[in-house]
């Protein structure tokens, strides 16, 4: 055996034992003739005492070695309480070099997270040796294992769905794969197992789930990996929205409680309609750790002679700035202009009166109305956001988030969950002068076919919902449209004919004509769950081998060139 124990396993009770450890050389320290080597593997570190310098011939940091020796107690002055193995050490009798390492490293292992990302990803195998990163990957494995157990305890069965499938218009660009056997034909990598899981419901499977890989040709963000991601995909037959919420609440709550010491909001999670979320928080993924809310002041300013607010919606945010200096307000204005706002008005309530640039436009009666309606207190500041209807709520949400951080009022020791519900089914496309689906096109409109036939498309609300935690969208889902007649009408409003349905969604549309049960589901994102639990700022730090922000694998060189033979076999020619 190359080892009897892991490097992080030995304790006081092992003193006197003959052991063999294998791992990487973390550090080598010379203490006047006696050398100390810290041996590291994924489980931790153990201090090795080297009495013979010849043992270290050819050995340097990050070399892989195997050490045989006896466990003994450390001297009192050398006990390291920061290590689980800090009370013991191994007195080396034999050391074998198993894997030499270059003497010059691209970066210090324990400082890899502060290294340029392109260098980290080029040498990702070294970056993963950093316990701060490897612990994230271990956490990810533990979370996935827990999720599987949780779903199976609720009666769900795991079913794998195809990776090579057909291209379909589902919101993002497809990754396409050429067919060798069928000239000019292509597979697509699935953006989600959407149609497959619905077909499983039609097939009679009652509760499906899988840890599903999804592929979307999208630009990267801090919480979105370009190319591929994983989600806990699940679907339930004979289910309504509340049934899906009950599963999500139980599984997500128990997962977060298991893997964090922070406070986790208990089920039932808050339910916020999309319209209310935009009005109160300026976002459909609100961070509820921030206590600030947005108020609509459009009516209030309808009879105020202030040109900047004329014929525009006005939003307000009350925040206690507690005597903040002028620089704070200057910084708020700087941030506002950086995100594209034309300005940021404010007035502060102090010593029984308002002070600020807009105060002169408000009569005594109007000032009193503001104080009473908004329950303003001493040192409260009211910030004003006004712009075009399409963008004012988003700007108000940005200012709310900035104030929460700048005033340090966001509860960083909590995970706050909520469901965002009742999304609009359609949005107007000014370029095509038609209607687009805003969310999942396979969703059931609230009110069914009757709503589609009798309402303005922009007023139709769908059984669509998201799970949001700390301002991060963890999941989307919907009650599915399982009626062929309703499906034809829903897609016709978005510009699709029945022939389009037969062409683009033939399997699903046809299957629904052979007896489809009502069904619903959602798909929480694995990467984002782990990112939150690991308290990382970027999703790439919880993925073993992520693409960079430009969707490149710079370690293996993807995307890369292929041979002319490969192109010919796939019936592909590359055009300039």
Image (cartoon, rainbow, N blue to C red):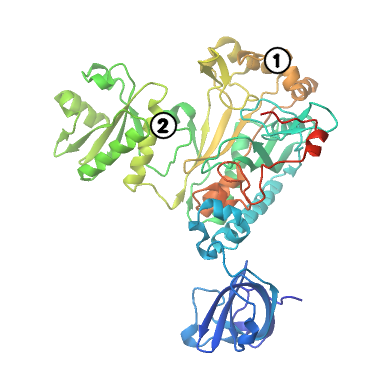
> In which quarter of the view is residue 449 placed?
top right
Q: Position of residue 205 (x, y in %)?
A: 77, 36
- Mark sitting on residue 282: 2
- Snapshot quadrant of residue 393: top left
C-alpha separation, residue under disc 1 versus residue under disc 2: 36 Å
| Residue 375 visible in this rendered orientation of the protein | no
Please tell me which residue is depicted at 55% across the width and 64% down the height of the picture. 109
- 347 to the left or right of 484: left
Q: Quadrant of the C terminus?
A: top right
The mark found on residue 463 in the picture is none
Residue 472 pos. (x, y %): 50, 41
Residue furthest to the top in view is 454
Q: Earlier in the sequence, mark 1 or mark 2?
A: 2
Q: Residues within 10 Å of mark 1 (few under 14, many from 20)?
A: some
| Residue 77 vertical placement versus 367 (above, below) | below
Bin the neighbour count of mark 2 within 10 Å (Cα to Cα): few under 14, some 14-19, many 20 and up. many
CB contact under 8 Å: marks 1 and 2: no
* Residue 215 sits above or below residue 111 on the image: above
Residue 98 placement (x, y as % from top left): 71, 74
Give the structural element (helix, strand or loop) at label 2: loop
What residue would you read off at disc 1? 485
Q: Position of residue 432 (x, y in %)?
A: 55, 14
């Amino acid at each position: 055996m190359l080892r009897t124990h892991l490097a992080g396993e030995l304790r006081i009770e092992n003193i006197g034992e003959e052991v063999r450890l294998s791992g990487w050389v973390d550090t080598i320290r010379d203490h006047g003739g006696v050398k100390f080597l810290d041996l590291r593997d994924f489980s931790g570190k153990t201090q090795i005492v080297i009495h013979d310098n010849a043992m270290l011939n050819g050995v340097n940091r990050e070399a892989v070695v195997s050490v045989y020796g006896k466990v003994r107690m450390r001297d009192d002055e050398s006990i390291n309480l920061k290590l689980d193995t800090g009370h013991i050490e191994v007195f080396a009798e034999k050391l074998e070099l198993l894997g030499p390492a270059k003497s010059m490293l691209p970066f210090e292992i324990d400082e890899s997270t502060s290294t340029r990302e392109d260098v980290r990803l080029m040498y990702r195998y070294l970056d993963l040796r950093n316990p701060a990163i490897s612990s994230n990957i271990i956490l990810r494995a533990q979370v996935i294992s827990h999720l599987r157990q949780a779903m199976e305890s609720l009666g769900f069965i795991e079913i794998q769905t195809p990776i090579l499938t057909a291209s379909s218009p589902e919101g993002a660009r497809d990754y396409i794969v050429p067919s060798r056997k069928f000239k000019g034909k292509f597979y697509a990598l699935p953006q989600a197992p959407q149609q497959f899981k619905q077909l499983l419901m039609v097939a009679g499977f009652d509760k499906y789930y899988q840890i599903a890989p999804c592929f979307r040709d999208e630009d990267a963000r801090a919480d979105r990996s370009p190319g591929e991601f994983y989600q806990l995909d699940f679907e339930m037959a004979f289910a309504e929205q509340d049934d899906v919420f009950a599963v999500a609440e139980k599984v997500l709550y128990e997962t977060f409680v298991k893997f964090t010491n922070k406070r986790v909001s208990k089920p039932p999670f808050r339910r916020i309609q999309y319209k209310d979320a935009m009005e109160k928080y300026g976002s459909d993924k609100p961070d509820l750790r921030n206590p600030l809310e947005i108020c609509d002041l459009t009516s209030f300013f309808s009879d105020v002679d202030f040109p900047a607010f004329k014929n525009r919606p006005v939003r307000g945010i009350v925040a206690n700035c507690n005597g903040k200096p002028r620089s704070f307000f200057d910084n708020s204005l700087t941030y506002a202009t950086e995100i594209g706002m034309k300005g940021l008005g404010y007035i502060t309530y102090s010593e029984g009166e308002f002070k600020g640039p807009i105060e002169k436009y408000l009569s005594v009666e109007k000032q009193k109305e503001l104080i009473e309606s908004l329950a303003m207190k001493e040192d409260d500041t009211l910030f004003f956001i006004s712009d075009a209807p399409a963008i004012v709520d988003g700007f108000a949400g940005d200012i709310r988030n900035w104030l929460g951080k700048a005033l340090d009022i966001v509860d960083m020791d909590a995970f706050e969950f909520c469901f965002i519900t009742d999304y609009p089914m359609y949005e107007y496309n000014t370029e095509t002068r038609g209607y687009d689906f805003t969310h999942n096109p396979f969703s059931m409109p609230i009110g069914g076919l009757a709503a589609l036939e009798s309402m303005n498309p922009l007023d139709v609300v769908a059984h669509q919902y998201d799970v949001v935690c700390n301002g991060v969208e963890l999941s989307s889902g919907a009650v599915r449209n399982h009626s062929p007649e309703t499906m034809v009408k829903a897609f016709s409003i978005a510009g699709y004919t029945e022939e389009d349905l037969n062409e683009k969604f033939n399997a699903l549309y046809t299957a629904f004509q052979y007896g489809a049960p009502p069904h619903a589901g959602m798909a929480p994102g694995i990467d984002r769950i782990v990112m939150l639990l690991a308290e990382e700022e970027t999703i790439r730090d919880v993925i073993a081998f992520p693409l960079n922000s430009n969707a490149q694998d710079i370690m293996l060189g993807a995307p890369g060139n292929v041979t002319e033979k490969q192109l010919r076999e796939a019936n592909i020619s590359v055009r300039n």
